[in-house]
Structures are given as C-alpha cells and as structure tokens.
Amino acid sequence: MKTRAFFLILTAALLCMQGSAQTLLPRPEAASIDPAHKVTVNSRKTVFKNIPKNQRVSLTTCLADLPAPNGGRRLTLQLMNPVSQDSGCDRQAYALTADKNGVRITAQAVQGLFYGLQTLRQLTDSLGQVPYANITDRPRFDYRGLMLDCSRHFWTKEFILKQIDAMAAVKLNRLHLHLTDAAGWRIEIKRYPQLTQRGAWRTESDWDKWWVFGKREYTEPGQGYGGFYTQQDLRDIVAYAAQRHITVIPEVEMPGHSEEVCFALPEVSCTGQPYGSGDLCVGKERTFQVLQDILDEVMDIFPSEYIHIGGDEASRKAWETCPDCQRRMREEHLSTTAELQSYLTERIERYLNAHGRQLLGWDEILEGKLAPNATVMSWRGTEGGLKAVHMGHKVVMTPGSYCYLDSYQDAPMTQPKAFGGYNPLEHVYSYDPVPDSLKGSPAEKLFLGVQGNVWTEMIPTPEQYEFMIYPRILALAEIGWSKEKSAYADFRLRAMAVNDGLRAKGYHAFDLHQEVGRREESRQPIQHLAVGAKVRYIGPYHEAYMASGDNALVDGMRGNWQFSDGKWQGFISRNRFDVVIDLGEVKPVSEVSAHFMQFAGPEIFSPASVAVSVSADDADYQMLYEQNFEVDASKPYFIQPYGWKGSTQARYIRFKATSGQYGGWLFTDEVVVR
Ligand SMILES: [Zn+2]
C-alpha cells in the first residue's frame, strides 16, 4: 500500500515538473496539474462574464463538444479588461484554473477563451472530470499554419471543413489554400468564367500520366479529372474557419505555375496561344487588368490581411523573346527577367496595399528586388527567410526539409508513393524557426511563425491526404505555439494520444503505433575487414552527396532511409560507381557486398550491373562476380544488397556498378568485406 501511494505522488510530481498533462498538445507555457484531484464540470452550466452576446458563437460551438454530466460544477468564461493587445499573441493568451469550485478561463480576447476551451477539452475525460489545474498560456508565434494544395488534386468543401476542426483543436490559426496552378484553377471568378470552364479539368488524375509523361492537356467541365469551388463554397469555408479563429489565406499563383490561365485566357500569355508558356506575360497591360479583376473578387471572398500571390518557379523563359516583355524591360530600365518579375510583384503589391491588404509570396520574390512591404514564405531551405529578415521583412518559415508533409514519414517501402525525401515526425519536431543567433534580437519579431505544406501531386485521395497531414502537423502546431519544446519521447506520447483521438473520430491519420522508425541497419556501426581501409575512387562521388568523403564507404556506418542523411554516398559521373579498396595486406575474403538504394522520385536507381574483382598487387585482377540486373523504374523505393560470397585471398578489391536505361544516380552507404 505504501509503495503504491509513493508511486502516485511521484507520478503527480513528474507531471507538474513537465508542466503538462500527458494529454496537452500543444504544451502550455506554464501548467501545474494534479491528476489526483478532479472536479466534474457541466458545460451546460457555463457562465459568460463580460462577453458581448454577438461574440459568443465560437465559444458555444466549442462547448457543444464538452460533456454535460448531471450535476457538476460550473464553467466560467470571462473577458478581462484588455491591458495590452499589441500583438496577435496577446489576443490568444488565456489562463485556466480548475479546482473544487469548477473551471474558470480568463483572457483578454475571445480568441484566448477559445484556446482555453481547447485546452479544457484535452483535460476533460468522457465523464466530464477535469484534474485540478493552474495554467497560463500564450503562443510563441502569431502565425501557425497549414497549407492545403487544392490544385494538383481537388478536395471537397466538406473535407476542408473537417481539417479546420482538427486544426482548431491544436490551436492552428492559418489555413493557406493553394487554389490555382497548372493542374487546375479551383476558384470561381465571375468576371472570367473561362478560368474554371477551361482550366479546372484535366485529362488525367494521375500526376505521372498527366504531367511527367503526359501531354498536360485540359478538358471539358465534368470530363477527365477536376472541379472548383464556387464563391459561395469559399465563403462557407471562410465563415466556418472564422468561427474557429482560423484565417483562410488564398493563394493565386503569378506569374509562374500559370499554364491553366494561359490556356483559359491566352491573351495573358506571351505568345497569345494556349499550351505555350506557363508564365504570364508581364509586358502586356491586359495581364495586369485580368490579375486585378481576379484579385478584386478574391479580396471580396477572403477578408484575410494576407493575399498569397505565389511567385515561385517562374521560368521567365518566354519573356526573353516576347516583344511586349522586352519593351516593358526597356521602358522600366530593367536589366534582368528576375527584375521583370519584381516589377509585377511590386505592382501587384501596390494594388493589394491600396485595398488594405498585404502581399505574401514564396521566397523567389526575393530575387530581383523585393517589394517594399512583402512578407516572405521561406520554402527553399531557411536562407530566403533569413535574408528577408535581414532586409527587415516579415517571414513565415516553411522550409521543405522540415515543413513539407508530403515527403515520406516512415520507412518508404511501407508507405504510399511520395515525391521524395524522408521527414518523420521526430524530424519535423526538431525544427526551430528562429536561429539561435537571432533569439532575443529585435529581428526575432519578424518571424511571424511556421507552416506545414502538403502538396498533392502524389496524393489522389482524401484518405491518403489525411494520412500525410496527421500526425506530423501536430509537431508544427506545438513548434508554433510552445516556447519550450519537450523531449521528443514526451511529445511523441502526447501526439500519439491526439492522433489516436483523430483516428477514433474518422480521420485517416498514419498510425504512429505502426511506425518502423530508423532503418535497422543504421542503428549500430558494423565491423568488417575494410573498416578504415584506403579507398581509391575510379568513379568519383558527387560533392553534394559526399557523405563523410573518402572513408564514407568503409566507416562502418550505414545510412537511414534518406539518401541525403550524410551516410549515403551519391554517384552520377560517367563511370558511376567504381572503387578499389586496399586492405593493406593479402587476407582471406569470403564476402564483398554493398547496399544500393532505389528512390525513383529523385531519380536514384538500382544498379544495372555489378562486378567484383580482386588482386594481390593492384595490377592483375581476378573477376569474382559479374552480373546484370533489370532496373525497374516502377518500384518507387527499396534498398537491396548486391555482391559476392565465396572464398578467396585478396589485398585489393574492386567494386564496380553501372546504371541502366534510366540513367540517374547510384547511392550506396558501405562496402562490406568479410
Ligand atoms: Zn510577354
């Protein structure tokens, strides 16, 4: 009995020390929770103090999800006199106490009360019992976002509303919708019905069939694959999100990624012909007229301060020979096509600013000259964001290696096909948007926050979409909200609880209980005859994938699932993979083998042939093994051993591997000699 009592106290103490109950995600700023004492709360006995009637709707929506057991104590929601509301973060702060008298949540703004209720929801069990608690909480960043790509594949309004519910529960507050791209224009524009009539359906749903190997053609409404949101659909989404304190940010791509616009309205392309360039013509005035007309309707639907104009990956190729673009460059004294893009960005920014809105764009808008008030979304690594901050601009950090949730989240061969990359929950959680060097500096305020992006080229179904979003978005929800991160093991437990809850509610989240995690072979160093041996490269490794350099193949370390993890070495030279390993003296040898990776997305293929030969003097070589293999590009991912087993004597071992009809890279992590 004594032991058991001691255990309970210890558990309670641990929870207090961690500052969070196991269920709270994101982790609050300060919390003491006493699970040994509980109060039963009846959500029907809610008292609103100092809250105008017309501001209660988001709170009553949330209360409907809380238990209302018979009896039970009251829940008090109270707005305090605003002391300071300098930042969005102040409006989102709240305090929560739970004791024998019931639960009381106070905040300076309704949004704070709403987040207090989300915390209460996580603390409450199915009987309406809440542990005694004392919590004060406030977000680290004002901006905590999720981007859904509605162009590459189209998602119903109901699907989007469902994701808004999940976002609100973990205190995410920005939903960025990628509404236009080559793959389909998804927003009804009354002034230009051609955009959806001609640009919202394509011949194939499958990305490889349509884009990679296909003709990239559009088709009639209702045929092929496609769809779009009516303006009423989007107003419904905006209103539903607003009730949950989520701002919907629309993205209308310009001037690149606009094949569908050039098809639907050829007069805005450089050639005036459909199926030409994917870039809008920046020379023609007509382009600006169309863009402004579109933005008028977009601003009417979306009250968001930020309007995202894309700005990424314009090829700028057609501009080099287009007479209109060239004339514009002369007239505006622009020397490069990058500056021509900046001309468009600045002009669109002036238009948005004149209507009380702010321009948000991908980090390519930094090229040329950055529009004076623009906010930058940094996706190609973190450099763009840091550069923008140094120039005094605000940034939202979304670097691909941490924040792209369309890459693999677990051992790739256990997962549906993804674009590439390996970004498991643990890696997402390890991200910190603010570099140490800027912490505490005035520049830190320019980091608005963080966002998860989930592109959908490889994601055709709503089930697969949810599988990619959850649980990884939970990591970004906590990074965006919590000033102090917990140990990953603690976070993973809490994420598991929230994720299980989502699955129970019908979200098709990836089951964290099934996570394979790190590649088994990469967990422990291996011992073999060649460890530390000298390696001569007849076919050099590529400097971008050199791993630890000349000893990478004999360092006893195997790689994880990702080819860029610093253990895998990459080969693209004409000879591909061709190395000689010097064991120092003639030794008995019974095995020479290496694992090769195939990762079809980034064009890494298995070898088309492997040859192993040995020598005592590095002059006369005896061929031990020579074999051709069929390269199957349809297999998205696997890692497979190749090599020889037998019995011989050797000092020098030559291992050669070639690539097949698809060309591409060879990747290996260790040549094992036994
Ligand atoms: Zn042009």
Image: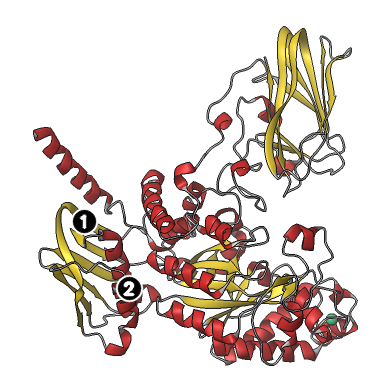
Q: Residues within 10 Å of mark 1 (few under 14, many from 20)?
A: many
Colouring style: secondary structure
Residue type at tag 1: Ser
Q: Nearer the viewer, residue 418 or 288?
A: 418
Residue 205, percent across and down?
Answer: 72, 64
Dot label at residue 544? none
Q: Secondary structure at mark 2?
A: helix
Residue type at tag 2: Cys
Q: Residue at x 37, y 47 (%)?
A: 493
Q: Quadrant of residue 183?
A: bottom right
Picture layout, residue 535 above or below residue 242: above
Q: Residue at x 26, y 80 (%)?
A: 83
Q: Quadrant of the C terminus?
A: top right
Q: Mark 2 — residue?
A: 62
Q: Residues within 10 Å of mark 2 (few under 14, many from 20)?
A: some
Q: Earlier in the sequence, mark 1 or mark 2?
A: 1
The answer to whether any part of residue 391 appears in the image is no
- 1 and 2 marks in contact (CB < 8 Å): no
Q: Mark 1 — residue?
A: 32
Q: Give the left or right position of residue 75, taking residue 476 as reference.
A: left
> Which is in the foreground here, disc 1 or disc 2?
2
Picture layout, residue 355 above or below residue 497: below
Q: Give the left or right position of residue 251, taking residue 657 as reference.
A: left
Residue 356, percent across and down?
Answer: 53, 89
The answer to whether any part of residue 267 appears in the image is yes
The CA span between labels 1 and 2 is 24 Å
Q: Secondary structure at mark 1?
A: strand
Q: Quadrant of the N terminus?
A: top left
